[in-house]
Amino acid sequence: MRMHIVELTAYHVRIPVRRSIRHASYSRSETDNVLVRCVLDDQTEGFGEGVPREYVTGETIDFVLDLLRRSDLRVQLEPCADFAGAVALAERLRLAPIPGDERGCQGNAARCAVELALLDAFGRRCGQPVSAVSPLVAPEVCAARAWVRYSGAITSARGWKLGLAAVALRLYRFRELKIKVGIAGYDDV
């Protein structure tokens, strides 16, 4: 059975959030995301979401939609015989070049939305969850282990909340922590 993608459509979706989301770099009361819909030849649909954040990677909704328009995805969308073939197809997809992207991180929101839509559609058609991708592309990561590695983060808390966060992470015996510093209005010393 050869499965074909017959349609890819990108949408700008603005979603209000119940409470304002605040973190070190930004505060927002809504989120602007890109949603991609993938339709296969039997009308099976899959959806993927990308979250461009100008203050993180320099991507905006307009940037992502323009990048998708400029990317010649149609010629890259080969038929797939099974879910493993769809995963390989998703790995081969290339977006249009982005001048000045030395870090290779711009376009990740667009790529994420397209890949997830494709994998969701083929997964539905083949009876596979998107979580079945990991064992196919990184079996060594999915191997059973005798231990699990976790880490924690101390973010923008201050005062007694900062102390409580540190004590809780210590009591839970986290071996690795990420401590965010350099937040405007906070004394990092």
Image (cartoon, rainbow, N blue to C red):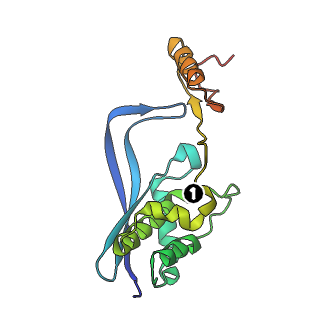
Horizontal arrangement in the rendering, residue 157 relative to residue 37 (left or right) = right
Drawn side of residue 174 relative to residue 54, left or right? right
Q: Residue furthest top?
A: 160
Q: Nearer the viewer, residue 24 or 60?
A: 24
Quarter of image, res 189: top right
Q: Position of residue 88 (x, y in %)?
A: 55, 74
- Residue at x-position 57% and y-position 50%: 58
Circle 1: is it few (<14), some (14-19), or many (20+) Cα within 10 Å?
A: few
Query: Which quadrant of the rendered structure holds the N terminus?
Result: bottom left
Instruction: Please provide percent x and percent y for residue 142.
Output: 57, 57
Quick check: 43 above or below 17? below
* Depth check, front residue: 56 or 92: 92
Residue 132, x across and y down, in percent? 47, 64
The residue nearer to you, when weighing 37 against 85, is 85
Vertical relation: 23 (above or below) 160: below
Q: Residue at x 58, y 66 (%)?
A: 137
Please tell me whether mark 1 sits on a helix, a strand or a loop. Answer: helix
Quick check: can you spot residue 111? no
